Amino acid sequence: MFKIKVIGIVGKTGCGKSFASDYLAKKLKSSIKLDVDLLAKEIYKKNKYIVNQITNCFGEDILKSDGSINFLYLGKKVFSDKNEIKKLNNIMFPLIYNEVSDFIKRNSYKKYIIIDAAILFDANLDNFCNKVILIKTMAKKRQSFLKCKNLNLCDEDINQRVKNQRIKIKKDKVDFIIENNSSIESLYRKLDIIINDI
């Protein structure tokens, strides 16, 4: 465990993790946010070996004409089949774990690091965390969030992601549970309540 406080925010896609982590990063002094989805995309961009591995695993049609990963197509492929997402996770999780560890070390002068990650428990990122916040949201609300966030996803893709996503939750490692089924303001008020205990 690191001397700084590492806060993990976990929940299914479209639950409001980004809103929560952005808010905490503003409210907590000397803090920095790590979006693990963006981190994973950076790994794809900078690591050609991984791109080759993923291409071998999922086929050449997941590549764009410039040789980069077509994330929309890859998402469709893995979210439609739990075996496919398991293959991708086996490739990516060890790399993500190492990158998160490096990020924390590089930012160890901060007071707080906020990790926004649906895969927090699946990738064992909870090992780095002092506190974990689980955000729970009804499926319809998650679909609505995703429609606002991902303009390139059609309704069918959104429904598939909401329906098929499975994430691990270690209940004994969760410190706070927030039900996020109302407004953003309501989410912020709930976060304000727990900030003193973080």
Image (cartoon, rainbow, N blue to C red):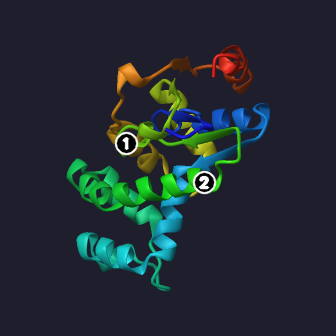
The percent position of residue 48, horizontal first and vertical second, equals 42, 80
Q: Amino acid at mark 1?
A: Asn
Which one is nearer the viewer's eye here, 105 or 42? 105
Q: Which residue is mark 1?
A: 124
Which one is nearer the viewer's eye here, 6 or 1? 1
Residue drawn at the location 46% of the way across and 62% of the way down: 72
Q: Amino acid at mark 2?
A: Leu
The percent position of residue 97, horizontal first and vertical second, equals 42, 53
Q: Secondary structure at mark 2?
A: loop
The percent position of residue 42, horizontal first and vertical second, equals 53, 66
Which one is nearer the viewer's eye here, 127 or 14? 127
Q: Which residue is mark 2?
A: 151
Mark 1 packing: few (<14 Cα in 10 Å), some, or many (20+)? some
Residue 153 is at least partly visible in this image: no
Distance between the Cα atoms at labels 2 and 1? 31 Å
The percent position of residue 184, horizontal first and vertical second, equals 70, 27
Image quadrant for the C terminus?
top right
Question: Which residue appears farthest toward the front when viewing the image?
Answer: 3
Dot placed on the residue nearer the N-terminal end, 2 or 1: 1
Residue drawn at the location 54% of the way across and 40% of the way down: 2
Q: Secondary structure at mark 1?
A: loop
- Is there CB contact under 8 Å for labels 2 and 1? no
Q: Which of labels 2 and 1 is toward the front?
A: 1
Residue drawn at the location 41% of the way across and 24% of the way down: 173
Which one is nearer the viewer's eye here, 107 or 61? 107
Mark 2 packing: few (<14 Cα in 10 Å), some, or many (20+)? few
Q: Relative to 17, say whether 172 is above or below.
A: above
